[in-house]
Amino acid sequence: MVKVKFEYKILISYLLIGGLWISFSDQLAKKIISDPNYLTEIQTYKGWFYVLVTGILFYFLLKKHLIKIRNAEKKARESDQLKTAFLQNISHEIRTPMNGIVGFAGLLKENDLTKDQKEMYLDIITKSSDQLLNVVNDVLDVSLIDSGNVIINKTQFNLNEFLEQIYSVHSTILRKNISLRLNNTLYSSDHIVFSDSVKLGQILDNLISNAIKYTPKGEVELGCETKENKLLFSVKDSGIGIAPEYHEKIFDRFHRAEIETTKTIGGAGLGLAICRGNVNLLGGDIWVESNLGIGSKFYFTIPGDFVVQKPTVEEKADSKSVLRPGCVLVAEDEEYNFLYISRILNDAGIDFLRAKNGQEAVDICRKNANLGLILMDIKMPVLNGYEAVKIIREFRNEIPIIAQTAFAIGNEKKKALDVGCNDYIAKPFKREELLNKIRENTKAITDL
Ligand code: ADP
């Protein structure tokens, strides 16, 4: 269908209404009014009436049209500004790593380089290439989100293992003056979720990288909990913080909190826009709480689509032998040891939480009244197992604590029992040994 332009529409309507009014208004007036004097008077007012009615009508039509045009103009101006910001930012973000690549590739051609120098230059080239690739990927991601072409691929995965993996990857590449903590308060029975693990990983990676990037020195904490049937993730840092006027804007493309410190830190201003796009696609929200100079905490939610694992036929038949010690707290700093214990507990259908040092064990114990047993490693950072048990005994006397340690010499068992442990298991232990210890120490509870 041919689209008639606005100005022609106005002209045609004006002529049409005018013509109809002239043709029919006289006939109408003659039908209603018989007095010729009165009729002449009416005909003068008839013209004014037409001007008034068409004036009001065209005023509203024009106003509506102008609002539409002004909005379009505003959008075009904004998009123009964004394009300029995009070009400036992207150009800077591309030139910086390119400089490294081109510069050091040139230097590599020199003949008198030592082996160390060559390795260093190659390292810089590799890192700069990765940086460049990240910028390109970010730009692609933003355009895919904008054009609605992102495909969400939901699968079942173990959230606890997933978080541990994210934590380990970032822990290995941390700067010296930053520490990373994982505060996962999910029970193991909640661990199988149905979501897009790739997108979730991308969001968390982005937030953790930002937290590390904008924290010159201090701590970053990755948290996960369930809230009102949703999964609530958080990334907290003790970095430079964000002024209140930027709390919303930073989630828009190319927007950066323009404070002096940020200017010296590179960034295209795309990461948070991608995070928000992905969080929304997963069905959640993202926001930040932050204070300048103190730190920031980014939160986001996704639907808590937990997959309930139904017991198999054999498990049902053997349900009496299934251990139900409540939730076990595994205090263990070594990754491989924890993986081994978590595998045994998982297979036995026992819920568990993890603490990576004695202090975390004390904190978790304070917060979780429904813990049924503690497996306490002795040699741990921050606070060792003995010290942690002593503190725990001050406020929880009844909880069974099993010390587990690789110190197999002398009086370790006696020492453990003296500080308040109920039992002791020496590493290395076999699956059945551990389960027996748990069974023995929780018998009193399960018999209740
Ligand atoms: P980029 O970091 O590349 O600039 P982002 O979209 O990831 O882009 O972040 C947008 C802006 O939000 C950043 O420029 C920075 O000003 C601010 N910001 C993001 N994360 C933090 C944080 N953890 N602490 C302080 N400021 C932050």
Image (spheres, rainbow, N blue to C red):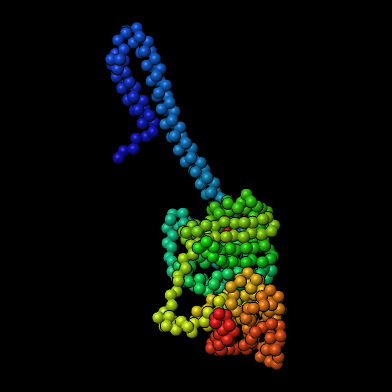
Task: Work out whether residue 116 can be spotted.
Answer: no
Image point 48% across, 71% down: which residue?
192
Residue 185 drawn at (x, y percent): 58, 69
Q: Quadrant of residue 404?
A: bottom right
Is residue 164 placed above or below 282 in the rendered structure? below
Task: Work out whether residue 45 can be spotted.
Answer: yes
Residue 165 drawn at (x, y percent): 55, 73
Is residue 333 placed above or below 259 in the rendered structure? below
Q: Quadrant of residue 31?
A: top left
Image point 69% across, 57% down: which residue?
293
- Judged from the image, the quadrant occupied by ligand 1 is bottom right
Outermost residue, bottom side = 410
Residue 354 drawn at (x, y percent): 59, 75
Residue 146 drawn at (x, y percent): 46, 54
Is residue 136 placed above or below 124 in the rendered structure? above
Residue toward you, 155 or 323: 323
Image point 35% across, 13% down: which residue?
43
Q: Quadrant of the C terminus?
A: bottom right
Residue toward you, 85 or 319: 319
